[in-house]
Image (cartoon, grey):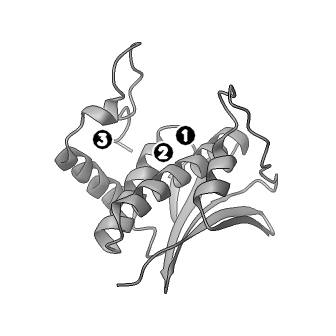
């Protein structure tokens, strides 16, 4: 993953996140580099290493596919990027896997994003309280997607969400 490691840098208190300082051109270049490195998740499942920095790659791939390839609205892309980040974060934190799969499907009126991992442990939608500092991932998926779920596989599971989109 040379060239993408370290993109999500730790920040000092009071500073902006590293991604906030990047120009749109730099982000676009990183998205294209991620596509080149991992492949296009709209053409088939791509494998990413199960490491925290892979969330940034998954976000870039999602942004690139949703906006550049499918031509969907920035608001749809923003929600899709947030939700894929949550699913990837869960796969990285809770499964102990070495890799996870990412796939994106567009069909008439819908987009679907899937994260596959080798664990059969089911994610759990927990109640969220105002002062909670973690555990909001599936709550966000539940609120911002039109539907979501988990498909158990013979070895592992696929966690997915779907969003309605306007057809051109």
Q: Residue 54 carries which label?
A: 2
| Residue to which mark 1 is pinned | 51
Q: Say whether residue 100 is left or right of residue 21.
A: right
When the figure is inspected, residue 150 is found, relative to residue 19, above or below; the finding is: below
Is label 3 in contact with label 1 (beta carbons under 8 Å)?
A: no
Name the spot of residue 118 as percent of width and height, x first: 72, 56
Q: Can residue 38 be seen in this view?
A: no
Task: Give the SS element for disc 2.
Answer: helix
Name the spot of residue 52 as percent of width and height, x first: 53, 37
Name the spot of residue 11 as percent of width and height, x first: 39, 19
State how far apart marks 1 and 2 are (Cα): 6 Å
Farthest residue, direction top = 13
User: Mark 3, residues whose alpha carbon is within 10 Å: few (<14), some, or many (≥20)?
Assistant: few
Q: Is residue 111 visible?
A: yes
Q: Say whether residue 5 is left or right of residue 28.
A: right
Residue visible at 67% across and 56% down in the picture = 142
Between disc 2 and disc 3, the foreground one is 2
Task: Give the SS element for disc 1.
Answer: loop
User: Mark 1, residues whose alpha carbon is within 10 Å: few (<14), some, or many (≥20)?
Assistant: some
Earlier sequence position, callout 2 versus callout 3: 3
Is label 1 in contact with label 2 (beta carbons under 8 Å)?
A: yes
Residue visible at 40% across and 84% down in the picture = 167
State how far apart marks 3 and 1 are (Cα): 15 Å
| Residue to which mark 3 is pinned | 3
Q: Say whether residue 31 is left or right of residue 155.
A: left
Residue visible at 68% across and 48% down in the picture = 139
């Amino acid at each position: 993953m040379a060239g993408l490691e370290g993109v999500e840098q730790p920040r000092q208190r009071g500073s902006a996140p590293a991604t906030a300082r990047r120009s749109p051109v730099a982000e676009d270049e990183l998205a294209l580099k991620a596509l080149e490195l991992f492949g296009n998740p709209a053409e088939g499942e791509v494998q990413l290493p199960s490491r925290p920095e892979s969330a940034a790659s998954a976000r870039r791939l999602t942004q690139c596919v949703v906006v550049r390839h499918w031509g969907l609205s920035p608001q749809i892309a923003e929600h899709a990027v947030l939700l894929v980040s949550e699913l990837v974060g869960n796969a990285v934190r809770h499964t102990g896997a070495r890799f996870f799969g990412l796939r994106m499907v567009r069909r008439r009126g819908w987009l679907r994003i899937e994260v596959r991992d080798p664990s059969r442990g089911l994610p759990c939608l927990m109640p969220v309280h105002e002062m909670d500092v973690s555990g909001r991932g599936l709550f966000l998926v539940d609120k911002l997607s039109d539907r979501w779920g988990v498909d158990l596989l013979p070895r592992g599971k696929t966690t997915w969400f779907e969003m309605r989109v306007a057809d051109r």
